[in-house]
Amino acid sequence: MTPTAQTVRSNLARVHERIADAGGDPASITVLAVTKGFGAEAPRAALDAGLTDLGENYAQELAGKAAQIGPAVPGPRWHFIGQLQSNKVRLVFDVVSCWQSVDRSSLVREIAKRAPGARILVQVNATGEPQKGGCEPGDVDGLVDLAREAGLVVDGLMTVGRDGDESATARAFADVAAQADALDLAVRSMGMTADLELAVRAGATMVRVGSALFGPRPAR
Ligand SMILES: *Cc1c(COP(=O)(O)O)cnc(C)c1O
């Protein structure tokens, strides 16, 4: 199934409605189009629909798609949103605009080495799920300091809700928003297709949306 620009445009209108219904301002909340699992036609359709911020989870897949798309005007601005091994940074440092899944010091050091001055978000595991990416909430301040000392620009915090648990997710989003406030960080990347309303209500400035824009992802 190939997403077209027309489909993405009408799906985006629906996402904007959902944001507005949750009390958010669609004009000031960035919709990050998550294109993982789709071919290069998905980022192309997103760009044609006016979405310039694109998200990918896997280094190899991002490198391939970025090469196929090339530079476009405006955008694309690629965001890395998946769990990232330090040794994969070298595959994508030249195309990533924002590293959203920074959750440990070794990754800070590798990004700072390959992409001096890069923009990052610190990912927080605010639901206590052991298999999930993100640093402990108590480690955020230290990681933000470390990243700044390494010359990186910390734009904000990113988090992922708890699948199928609305109250835990709402609590996690509220906690991360409060932590961003306390650190005076502008960007809160929270919420995906299933829980974007909860994120908007908690003060998300960016929602990361895949299936609501492109339809169900093909099996990996
Ligand atoms: C895949 C993914 C998304 C998008 O998920 P959808 O449910 O398709 O909207 C958002 N954020 C992260 C971190 C993801 O891995």
Image (spheres, helix red, strand yellow):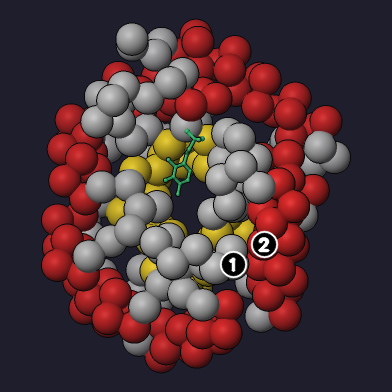
Kindly identify the residue that appears in the image at 46 percent across and 74 percent down. Answer: 135
Question: In the image, is the residue at mark 2 within 8 Å of ligand 1 by its beta carbon?
Answer: no
Residue 158 pos. (x, y %): 54, 61
Q: Quadrant of residue 218 in the image?
A: top left
- The answer to whether marks 2 and 1 mark residues whose Cβ atoms lie closer than 8 Å is yes
Is residue 76 in sight in this rendering? yes
Q: Quadrant of residue 13 in the image?
A: top right
Mark identifier at residue 172: 2
Reply above or below: 83 against 122: above
Residue 107 pos. (x, y %): 29, 75
Q: Quadrant of the C terminus?
A: top left
Mark identifier at residue 126: 1
Is residue 177 in sight in this rendering? no
Question: In the image, is the residue at mark 1 within 8 Å of ligand 1 by its beta carbon?
Answer: no
Reply above or below: 137 against 85: below
Mark identifier at residue 205: none
Q: CA distance from mark 2 to mark 1?
A: 5 Å
Q: Does dot 2 land on a helix, a strand or a loop?
A: helix
Kindly identify the residue that appears in the image at 71 percent across and 68 percent down. Answer: 175
In this picture, residue 112 sits left or right of residue 91:
right
Residue type beneath disc 2: Ala
Sequence-wise, the earlier of marks 2 and 1 is 1
Residue type beneath disc 1: Ala
